[in-house]
């Protein structure tokens, strides 16, 4: 009986700490408000209750992305992300020209969407497709 209680407690501890909980596949598409795809950058899901766990995916030429988890100080790259509440931010810059040997970087999107503390985007994961429509950069 004691061994059954110990085993049950260990299983609960593993579930609560996230060990053994499979990642959910997460993908989607990022477009501007007019439907034009964002063609460069990264989508980042930052777990609301963690400073160490996030998932990110590179944006393709058609605006699509798929996430892979990233854990600071640990092995990363496992597809998807664990269930939870996320702040979503998007990093996107593009090189437009080089002047006097200096690269001029321009922003493609409104910079509030690129800031973890200012972004209005959120997601609740257990997986699925998460499409985002964002405004273009305003000077």
Image (spheres, grey):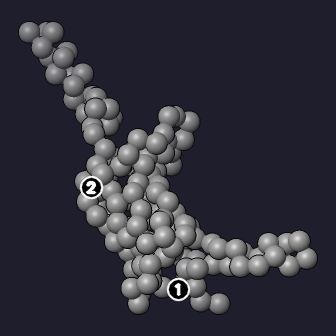
- Tell me where residue 112 sits by quadrant: bottom right
Query: Which residue does the image show at 48% across and 39% down from the upper left?
Result: 76
Q: Is residue 127 left or right of residue 7?
A: right
Question: Answer yes or no: do the residues labelled 1 and 2 have beta carbons within 8 Å?
Answer: no
Query: Which residue does the image show at 33% across and 56% down from the upper left?
Result: 26
Query: Which residue does the image show at 27% across and 55% down from the upper left?
Result: 127
Q: Helix, strand or loop at disc 1? A: loop
Q: Residue 60, percent across and down?
A: 47, 66
Q: Is residue 116 visible?
A: no
Q: Is residue 107 left or right of residue 27?
A: right
Q: Which residue is mark 2?
A: 127
Q: Residue furthest front?
A: 61
Q: Is residue 10 left or right of residue 115?
A: left
Q: Is residue 77 visible?
A: yes
Q: Residue 103, percent across and down?
A: 79, 72
Q: Which residue is mark 1?
A: 136
Q: Residue 97, percent across and down?
A: 77, 79
Vertical placement of residue 114 versus 57, above or below: below
Q: Helix, strand or loop at disc 2? A: loop
- Tell me where residue 134 sits by quadrant: bottom left
Query: Which residue does the image show at 50% across and 49% down from the upper left?
Result: 51
- Tell me where residue 45 sits by quadrant: bottom left
Q: Which mark is residue 17?
A: none
Vertical placement of residue 119 versus 23, above or below: below
Packing grade of label 2 (10 A; few <14, some 14-19, many >=20) is some
Q: Quadrant of the C terminus?
A: bottom right
């Amino acid at each position: 009986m004691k061994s059954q209680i110990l085993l049950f407690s260990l299983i609960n501890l593993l579930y609560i700490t996230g060990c053994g909980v499979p990642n959910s596949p997460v993908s989607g598409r990022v477009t501007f408000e007019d439907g034009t795809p964002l063609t460069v950058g990264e989508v980042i899901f930052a777990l609301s209750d963690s400073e160490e766990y996030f998932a990110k995916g590179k944006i393709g030429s058609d605006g699509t992305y798929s996430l892979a988890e990233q854990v600071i100080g640990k092995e990363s790259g496992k597809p998807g992300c664990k269930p939870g509440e996320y702040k979503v931010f998007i990093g996107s810059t593009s090189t437009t020209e080089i002047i006097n040997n200096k690269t001029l970087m321009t922003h493609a999107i409104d910079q509030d969407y690129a800031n973890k503390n200012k972004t209005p985007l959120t997601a609740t994961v257990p997986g699925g497709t998460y499409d985002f429509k964002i405004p273009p950069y305003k000077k």
